[in-house]
Amino acid sequence: MISSFEEWCWELMFEEEKEDFVKSLIANMCWMIWKERCKFEYQHVQVNPILVGANAMPFTNHFLQLQLKKKHWKDLQIDVAVEAMNIGELQMQIF
């Protein structure tokens, strides 16, 4: 049974079956709330809580798209490195 906000957040973030999107959205919401809180506190800027929530979704989508590109790029680099090793082994066998 969850008895605190901290336990609830911990369960949401580290439960195995939660999707990356859900985890990223929660993390981004927390970050945006913190950022807006700091703007309000230190810059005396009026914040709109509805916009904080609305901006979290596109930010999360953008973040996950970048993660996919990064993963694809890493996979591509690994493939190129393996291919280069195979070519190097082939050249060693020829000589």
Image (cartoon, helix red, strand yellow):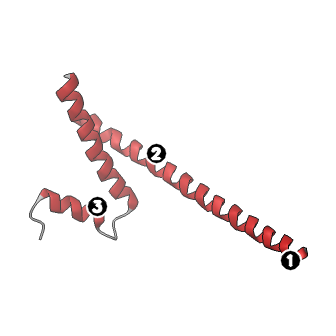
Observer-side mark, 3 or 2, equals: 3
- Which residue is the site of mark 2? 62
CB contact under 8 Å: marks 3 and 2: no
Q: How crowded is mark 3: few (under 14 residues within 10 Å), some or many (20 or more)?
A: some
Kindly identify the amino acid type of the residue bearing the numbered disc 1: Gln
Q: Determine the secondary structure under disc 3.
A: helix
Residue 56 drawn at (x, y percent):
34, 43
Viewer-proximal residue, 50 or 35?
A: 35
Q: Quadrant of the C terminus?
A: bottom right
The image position of residue 15, as x and y in percent, is 29, 68
Q: Which residue corresponds to mark 1? A: 93
The kind of residue on which mark 2 rests is His
Q: Name the residue under label 3.
A: 13
Marks 3 and 1, Cα distance to the nearest angstrom?
51 Å
Residue lying at 10% horizontally and 60% vertically, measured from the top left: 4
Q: Which residue lies furthest to the right in this view?
A: 95
At horizontal 29% and vertical 43% (from top left) the residue drawn is 31
Q: Nearer the viewer, mark 3 or mark 1?
A: 1
